[in-house]
């Protein structure tokens, strides 16, 4: 089973850069897209609704919040939108496709601008709520794969210039500690199960691949899937946005 996660910086712009043409060549079972920057209603072209997929969106009807989408080759039993975190569902977007024993989620975590204490506090509160949610669902008799732009780089290996970014939101000690606790609780960074290289980045905030790279785009999996990870790569041959698609293959059958 192949899952692609991609943060688009605006899905219409990514489409103009050739993302959907590339997506059609990947034979993915799921494609999770974050940061749409438009509503589903704005996507009038058939390009956004490939024939081989069931497409689901979670966005703000006013187009003010950044939405997420999940493309599923196999029809899910149910689709869940939001995490039930009150108004945080308008800041941290989430959509989930449920199958018999597996759920695949697409997450866009809140972002905090450097120097904005209010945004950072809101982001921290969101991740505390998310930690509680993930602990709760870990007791269910199903496995989870949560793909997304988490707006956090976990370790020093996930940031190209650690000195420059040591006090930057996304690489703050308390944020990295949150990721530590998530992994210690049993969840797994799927990409790191098969690739420990220190130069594997998926986001270039300066907009230039090869400069100030970060890895903030994760596929986090429940511990029962740890040994199902077959392959992982960050696709960097073409630029569709400031983020690169993350491709993971799992030894799983729906």
Image (cartoon, rainbow, N blue to C red):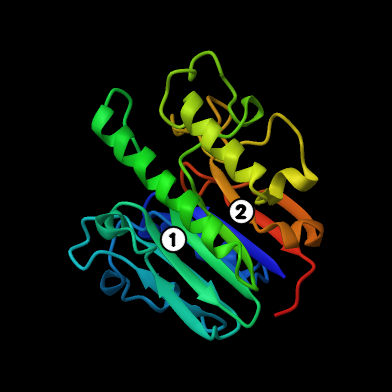
Quarter of image, res 147: bottom right
Residue 165: percent from left, percent from top: 48, 20
Quarter of image, res 248: bottom right
Marker count (numbered): 2
Residue 136: percent from left, percent from top: 52, 61
The image shows residue 228, relative to residue 198, as above or below, that is below
- Marks 1 and 2 close (CB-CB < 8 Å): no
Does residue 49 show up?
no
Quarter of image, res 85: bottom left
Closer to the camera, 247 or 100? 100
Task: Choose the circle earlier in sequence order: 1 or 2.
Answer: 1
Q: Is residue 178 left or right of residue 250?
A: left
Q: Is residue 236 left or right of residue 151?
A: right
Q: Secondary structure at mark 1?
A: helix
10 Å crowding of disc 2: few (<14), some (14-19), many (20+):
many
Residue designated by label 1: 15
Q: Is residue 156 left or right of residue 205?
A: right
Residue 139: percent from left, percent from top: 61, 65
Does residue 68 show up?
yes
Task: State how far apart marks 1 and 2 are (Cα).
Answer: 22 Å
Residue designated by label 2: 219
Task: Write the residue at 55% across / 56% down.
Answer: 135
The image shows residue 198, relative to residue 189, as above or below, that is above
């Amino acid at each position: 089973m192949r899952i692609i996660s991609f943060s688009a910086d605006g899905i219409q712009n990514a489409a103009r850069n050739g993302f959907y043409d590339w997506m059609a060549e990947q034979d993915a079972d799921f494609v999770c897209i974050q940061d749409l920057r438009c509503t589903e209603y704005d996507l009038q072209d058939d390009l956004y609704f490939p024939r081989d997929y069931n497409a689901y969106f979670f966005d703000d009807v006013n187009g003010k919040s950044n939405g997420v989408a999940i493309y599923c080759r196999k029809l899910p039993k149910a689709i869940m939108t939001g995490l039930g975190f009150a108004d945080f569902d308008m800041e941290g977007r989430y959509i989930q496709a449920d199958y018999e024993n597996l759920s695949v989620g697409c997450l866009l975590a809140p972002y905090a601008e450097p120097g904005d204490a209010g945004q950072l506090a809101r982001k921290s509160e969101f991740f505390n709520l998310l930690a509680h949610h993930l602990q709760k669902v870990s007791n269910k008799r199903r496995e989870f794969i949560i793909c997304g732009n988490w707006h956090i780089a976990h370790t020093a290996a996930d940031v190209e210039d650690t000195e420059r970014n040591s006090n930057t939101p996304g690489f703050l000690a308390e944020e990295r500690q949150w990721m530590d606790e998530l992994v210690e609780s049993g969840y797994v960074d799927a990409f790191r199960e098969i690739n420990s290289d220190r130069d594997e980045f998926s986001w270039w905030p300066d907009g230039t691949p090869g400069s100030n790279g970060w890895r903030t785009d994760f596929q986090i999996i429940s511990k029962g899937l740890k040994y199902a990870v077959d392959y992982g790569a960050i696709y960097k041959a073409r630029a569709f946005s400031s983020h690169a698609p993350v491709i993971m293959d799992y030894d799983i059958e729906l």
